[in-house]
Image (spheres, grey):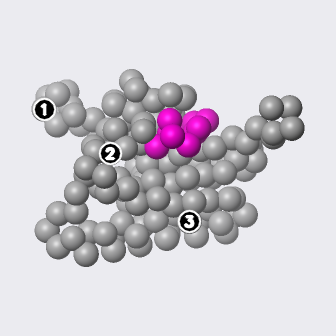
Amino acid sequence: MADQEYKIKILVGYDGSNSAKDALKLAKDHAKVFDASVDVVTSMAEAKNNQYDDVRQAEIGLEYAKALLEDDNINCETHLLIRGLSPGEDLVQFAADHQISEIIVGVRRRSKVGKLLMGSTAQHVILKAPCPVVTIK
């Protein structure tokens, strides 16, 4: 193990929302400071309505994220996950499978009742992640 260099890996949960864009910008800052690579993940439990349009929109968002990071010479990989898991489950599973050092997710303001009834991606990630989680609103 002494021969292996430890590389910090940051995971950003990205859905195109303003809070996700803020998370992406924070990941960019962290990657610069820590010389880290960034994995940007979009999770879709399923493609709704017109599947092609949903997938294409997600791909466009990931292309935007990759360009933003690579403009600053940050090593970035993008991943579109459609595995039937909730976004929170997908992010936690991806982090465990890829030895992620830090997860950054945007949070949206929701009422307590809304969180109770609908669940919360960020809440699931915070409680279940195998690494530190940073949230940004």
| Label 3 vs 1, first from the N-terminus | 3
Q: Nearer the viewer, mark 3 or mark 2?
A: 2
Q: What's the residue at 66%, 51% (across, down)?
A: 37
Q: Quadrant of residue 121?
A: top left
Circle 1 — which element?
A: helix
Q: In the displayed structure, does residue 95 sit left or right of residue 42? A: right
Q: Is residue 44 magenta?
A: no
**Callout 3 touching callout 2 (CB < 8 Å):** no
Q: How far separated are the C-alphas under marks 3 and 1?
A: 34 Å
**Callout 3 touching callout 1 (CB < 8 Å):** no
Examine the rendering and report whether any part of residue 136 can be seen.
Answer: no
Quarter of the figure with the C terminus: top left
Q: Disc 3 marks which residue?
A: 66
Q: Disc 1 marks which residue?
A: 117
Q: How far separated are the C-alphas under marks 2 and 1?
A: 16 Å
**Callout 2 touching callout 1 (CB < 8 Å):** no
Residue type pointed to by label 2: Pro
Residue type pointed to by label 3: Lys
Q: How far separated are the C-alphas under marks 3 and 2?
A: 20 Å
Circle 2 — which element?
A: helix
**Residue 107: x %, y % from top left:** 37, 40
Circle 3 — which element?
A: helix
Task: Report the span colored magenta.
Answer: 94-103
Examine the rendering and report whether any part of residue 38 can be seen.
Answer: yes
Q: Which mark is residue 87?
A: 2
Q: Quadrant of residue 126?
A: top left
Relative vertical location of residue 110 with respect to residue 132 in this rendering, above or below = below
**Residue 2: x %, y % from top left:** 86, 32
